[in-house]
Amino acid sequence: MGAISSLGIGSGLDLNGLLDQLQDAEREKLVPIEQQVETEQTKISAYGQLESALSTFQDSASALADGSLFESLSTNVSGEAVSAAADETAMPGSYNITVDTLATRGTLASEGVDDAEAALTTVDQDMTFAFGDGSETTTVAIAADSSLEDIRDAINADETAGVNATIINDGTQDRLALSSRETGADASISDFTFSDAAPFAADTANTLQDGTDAALNVNGIAITSPTNQVEGAIQGVTLNLQSEGDSTVAVEQDTRAVREAITSFVDSFNALKESTGELTSFNQETGEAGPLNGDSTVRTVESRMRSVLSGGIAQEGDGFSMLSQVGISLEVDGTLSLDNDKLNDVVANDQQALSEFFAGSGDNPGLAGQVNTAVEQMLSSSGTVSGAISGSENRIESLGDRYTSMEQSIGQTIDRYRTQFGQLDGMIAEMNQTSSYLTEQFDSLDAQLGR
C-alpha cells in the first residue's frame, strides 16, 4: 500500500478540516496574551499623554520661575509720530517726543539719453559716486558697450555701490535715477563721474534731492539721527520715527506678560487635570474605563502636584506665601481657578512680591521653581512616569516571550495531531481495503455455491 499524500484520501474523512478546527482551538490560548499586550501598549500611549501634559505644565512653571519676567518692561505710545520698543536695560519713565524732520535718502538723476538700450560706453571704465560733502566715494565697474539699462544693472548688482538705480522717462528721454541706499546727510548721493569719456553727466538743475538726518526733541533735548530708527536717545529704548509730530512714550513694567504667564500656568495645570481625569475615568452605565483607571502612577502625580500647590512657600515679612493670595484657588475637584480682579491688582501694585512668590529669591526657589523641580523628577529617567512606561515595556517583552513559547507548543501539538491523523487515515484505508477484499471473496463463494 502506497503512502497517503493528503489527510483523508485513504479514509474519506475530512481530517484536514478537523485539524484546522483543532488548530483554531489551540490558538485561542494566545488571545489572552494578545489582549494583555494590547492593554500594555494602550497604557504606554496613555502614559505618553500624561507625560505631554506634565511637560506643558512644566513649561508654564519655568516661565514663572524666571525672575526676568517680572522685570520686563514695555512701551506705551500715544501719538502717531513714533513707535517704540524697550529692552532689559530700559528704565521706567515718561518721555515727550517731537519729530521735526524724518531722515531721508538722497536722490540724483542723469541727463537724458534717447535710447535706454543703445550702447553708451566704448571702453571698460569706472563710475564713481560721491556722498555727502564728497569725502566718501564708491566705485562700480562699467563694461564697454554698456547701455543705460546695463549701467543700471551693474550698479544694482554691486553691494558696495551705496545707491540703487532705476530708469525713468521724462516724456522725451530716459534718465538714470539714483537713490541712496541709506538715509541721512552723510549717505546722501551728491554726484557721480566716469573715469573715461562720460556718456552722460549728473543733472542737478532740478532733480537733486539731498538726504537729510532726522531731527527730534526728547524731553527738551535736541537729537539728530542719520536713520529713522533711533537708539540711545532713551536708555534701552529704540524709537522708530513714523512722521513729523508729537508723541509720548511711557516705559513701564510689562504687566501683560506677567498676567499671560500666570494665566498659562493655571490653564496648563487644568489641562493636566483634565487629561488625568480622562485617563482614569470610569463609566458606570457602560462599564468602560480609561486606560489608567486605578493606576498608581496617576495617583502619585496628582498627589505630588496637589502637595506642591497647596503647600505654598515660606516667606518673611508681608510677602505672598499661598496661591490664594495672588488670586489662584485650588478647588475641591482639584482644578485651579483664577480671580482676575485680584490678580490684576497684585500685578499692577506688587510685582516684587509676586516675583519672590513665583520665581523666588536667594535660596528660596519660589512656588514655580518647586513645581518645576517636582515635574522634572517625575519625568526623569528614574522618575514615576518613566518607571511606569518601562514597567509596561518590560511586561510586553515578557508577554512576547510567553507568546513565542506558546506558539511553539501549539505547533508541536498540531504536528502530533497531524501524525496521529495520518496513522488513523492509513489504518482506516487498510481496513477498507480488507473489507473490500473479503466482500469480493464472499461474493465469489456465493456465486460458486449458486446462492
Image: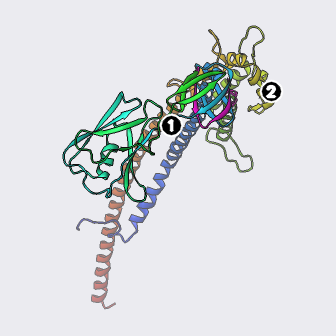
Location of residue 11 in the rendering, given as x and y in whole percent from the top left corner:
35, 69
- Choose between 413 and 164: the one closer to the eye: 164
Secondary structure type for disc 1: loop
Neighbor class of circle 1 (other Cα within 10 Å; few <14, some 14-19, many 20+) is many
Q: Closer to the camera, 402 or 71?
A: 71
Evaluate if marks 2 and 1 touch, with contact meaning CB atoms under 8 Å apart: no
Give me the residue at 52% from left, 27% from top: 225
Mark 1 residue type: Thr
For this rendering, which residue is in front, 244 or 249? 244
**Looking at the picture, how far across and down is residue 212, in whole percent?**
50, 33
Residue pushed farthest front?
Answer: 205
At 74% from the left and 22% from the top, the residue drawn is 310
Check residue 258 for magenta coloring. Answer: yes
The answer to whether residue 181 is above or below residue 167 is above
The answer to whether residue 236 is visible is no
Q: Amino acid at mark 2?
A: Lys
Instruction: Please identify the quadrant where the N terminus is shown.
Output: bottom left
Q: Which residues, given as a range, are shown in magenta?
A: 234-259
- Report the Cα–Cα distance between label 2 and label 1: 49 Å
Q: Residue furthest bottom?
A: 450
Q: Which residue is mark 1?
A: 104
Label placed on residue 187: none
Residue occupied by mark 2: 342
- Residue 282 colored in magenta in the image: no
Number of the front mark, 2 or 1: 1
